[in-house]
Amino acid sequence: MARLWPTREEWAAAAEHSVRTACMPLERVAEGAEHYLSTTEFAELNGLYVTLSAAVRAPLTAEIKRLQALLPSPIPHRPLDRARWYDALTAEQQSAWQALQALRNARLEIGRRAQGQTYTLIGWLRSSLKYSVLSPQVAPFVVDVEGLRRLAELEAKYTQLREQAAQVVEAAAIAKAIEVRNSDEGWAKELERRARIDDGPVVVYTHPVTQDHEPTT
């Protein structure tokens, strides 16, 4: 049975939708803060992450120990046993356990940042600030309030500039797609693409047949 393709008008009208659904806007632009901040600002950003992360590790560890003391021990290692252990906790202990997990994750990431593994060395850290010194769980333990404020300011600037760049690139991609889909050349290429698909081999996936073996006696 022949494939039912959109008409030329329908295909052209779907240009913007095609671009927007191809990927997220931020996937169209560079990720690192070094692409959006000045060299001085980028160096300041990394420096603040190192110094603030190094300074917050001691009070963070103290809070982790305090939360651990609120929980019955030992904590089971097996997931099922741990689930039963958690269900037996009081509401206050369950809150302590949840906070403990968040702070442990934060300490792990902050430890890397304290060693200088920030934007330059670990790309995935710049995608999420969930466990950084800027996170709500950790910020209360940071003594250098002014440094924390400056770090948040630089992060906000970087985020804003990257989002603006993504919007510009996406808008350009939409304009280009509309132009192409409304041109005779673009339509001709689309017809060629459809013909290749229609004339191509039909791939049918079949599940492997499992043979039952009679038990030997």
Image (spheres, helix red, strand yellow):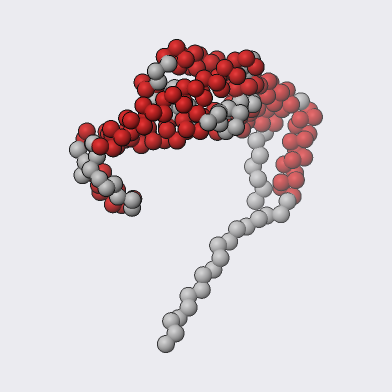
Quadrant where the image shows the C terminus = bottom left
Residue 52 located left or right of residue 18: left
Residue 72 located left or right of residue 30: left
Whether residue 137 is visible here, answered yes or no, is no
Look at 49% across and 22% down and name the residue there. 51
Whether residue 134 is visible here, answered yes or no, is yes
Q: Which one is nearer the viewer's eye here, 70 or 208?
A: 70
Residue 162 located left or right of residue 110: right
Q: Which one is nearer the viewer's eye here, 154 or 212?
A: 154
Look at 60% across and 58% down and name the residue there. 205
Residue 31, image quadrant: top right
Look at 57% across and 17% down and name the residue there. 44
| Residue 93 image position (x, y, % from top left) | 23, 36
| Residue 65 image position (x, y, % from top left) | 31, 35
| Residue 58 image position (x, y, % from top left) | 39, 28
Q: How many marks?
A: 0
Residue situated furthest bottom in the rendering: 217
Q: Which one is nearer the viewer's eye here, 26 or 184?
A: 26
| Residue 107 image position (x, y, % from top left) | 42, 33
Residue 12, image quadrant: top right
From what the image shows, is residue 149 above or below residue 25? above
Residue 90, image quadrant: top left
Look at 71% across and 27% down and name the residue there. 181
Residue 187 located left or right of residue 95: right
Q: Which one is nearer the viewer's eye here, 125 or 51?
A: 51
